[in-house]
Amino acid sequence: MAAAVSRLHDWLTVDQVRDLSRSLADPEPVRVQRLDSFERFRELPIEPNPLYRGYGYFTGVDLTGLDAQAQGPRVDRPPALEGVVRIVHDAAGTTIDVPPATAAGGVRIVPLADVWAAGGGTLSTFLRGSEAPSDRLNALASVLVNRGYRLEIPDGFTHPVRVQEFSILSRPHEAMSIRRSIRAGDGAQLLLTEEVFSAPSIPEGQRLYASSSDVDLGARTKGVFLTVHGPDLRTVSIYRRTATTGPDARLAWLWNGLGGFRSKIRNQTQLVGTGSHVDDLQTFYGAKNQSYDSAVDFTHVGTDTHGQSITRGVFTDEARGMSRGLVRIEPEARKTIAYVSEHAMLLSRGARSDTIPILEILCRDVKATHSTSVAPVDPEKVFYLETRGISPPESVKMISEGFLSYVLERSPVAGLREFLYPSLETRWAGRELVWKSGAFPILPFLSVAGTEAAPEWRFDTKLR
């Protein structure tokens, strides 16, 4: 990203890193990794690839006074959904509630402190993928890890597992950095929602939310990972998500961007198992001075693998968007089908978006395509709706909602469009999504079912 970051050395000091390490009782490998990541944070650029530094937009970021040990009371919480694993991260720490029936079946969630205490292979697996961050912000996320867990679903556990995870920012200059390590065994079914919000606004400095997830799917495993990103407009966010698929596994990454000041998303998926299938579906709504920077990387390794990345964004005011989709098809990845689609709609002269699809094909026996566009609202569509008695602002809104629904309707989560539209309506009206008693902007019961676009996406029962 092109712009320089102001007062970088005031964001964090080595003494703060050491204090955080002591407070979390880091084992030696973690302590060493934190300090190594801190040096990388001070030295690396925000965007490591010089080809894309001119496209990103990360001006105005100033995390001076960042506090990874900020503490406060527990936030108010809605009643738990029956039969659902619930994980809540807030200023009081992390709480994990696992239904007895789920735990009895062998599903384990190991909190961060217990991962640290276990050491050995458990610790090595948990730290995988974060050993050498390639850019400044991911290095910062690695330095500040202060929440996390290891989720293990055993082979043959066929009852759908539903995990609802909330992350609530509520303190000035707060830094919340979460790491997840997930192993879903052969034949497992998992629906995990990551819902990120802020408590009533505190007008004091910027805050950091970092989310790092490493996922391994076994043979015939189905996994859906849905993120609803709705923090306040002083939150800088960093997402790093990686996955490896087993034979005939199916994975869906879903990301719905509504809030935040600056958001950086990096998804990397390796389709290793024969017949595995991955969908990466992302939507963004940007207003005021928000910016989203997303990069999706698919590497097709196994034969007969299918991958599609569909990204759509609507931007108004001075908002910015950048989406980059890279598909690499290895020499032995025969019969691959790959598709990259990146489209953006601009609603104002000050808005901007860049879309960059990339195909790297090293095998002949494949089918790989891409499409991209950045354009304003079609005036003919607006005129058509006006002739039906709909006002111009409402016409633009309807067209924008329909533009984003193209992605949501291809999601394997049944009814996702209807569940997310109240939040989109709030942002469209210029209001922030706020976590408060009596008005929690959370997702309800969800199920994974087939759609016309992907009828094979049907779990045996509802995920509850």
Image (spheres, grey):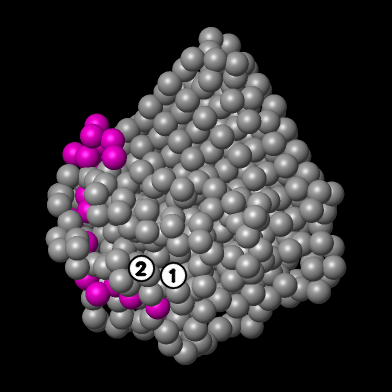
The residue identified by callout 2 is 17
339 w.r.t. 105: above or below: above
Q: Do we see residue 175 in this rendering?
A: no
Magenta range = 48-69
Where is residue 416 drawn, in percent x and y?
A: 57, 57
- The front one of 59 and 151 is 151
Residue ID at (66%, 79%): 80
292 w.r.t. 170: above or below: above
Amino acid tagged 2: Val
The residue identified by callout 1 is 21
**Is residue 174 one of those drawn in magenta?**
no
Magenta stretch mostly in which secondary structure?
A: loop
Residue ID at (82%, 54%): 157
Q: Which residue sits furthest front?
A: 28
Residue ID at (19%, 39%): 54
Q: Which residue sits furthest top?
A: 364
Horizontally, is 103 left or right of 260 in the view?
right
Q: Give the quarter of the image for residue 153.
A: bottom right
Q: Are marks 1 and 2 in contact (CB under 8 Å)?
A: yes
- The front one of 142 and 339 is 142
Where is residue 14 drawn, in percent x and y?
A: 30, 66
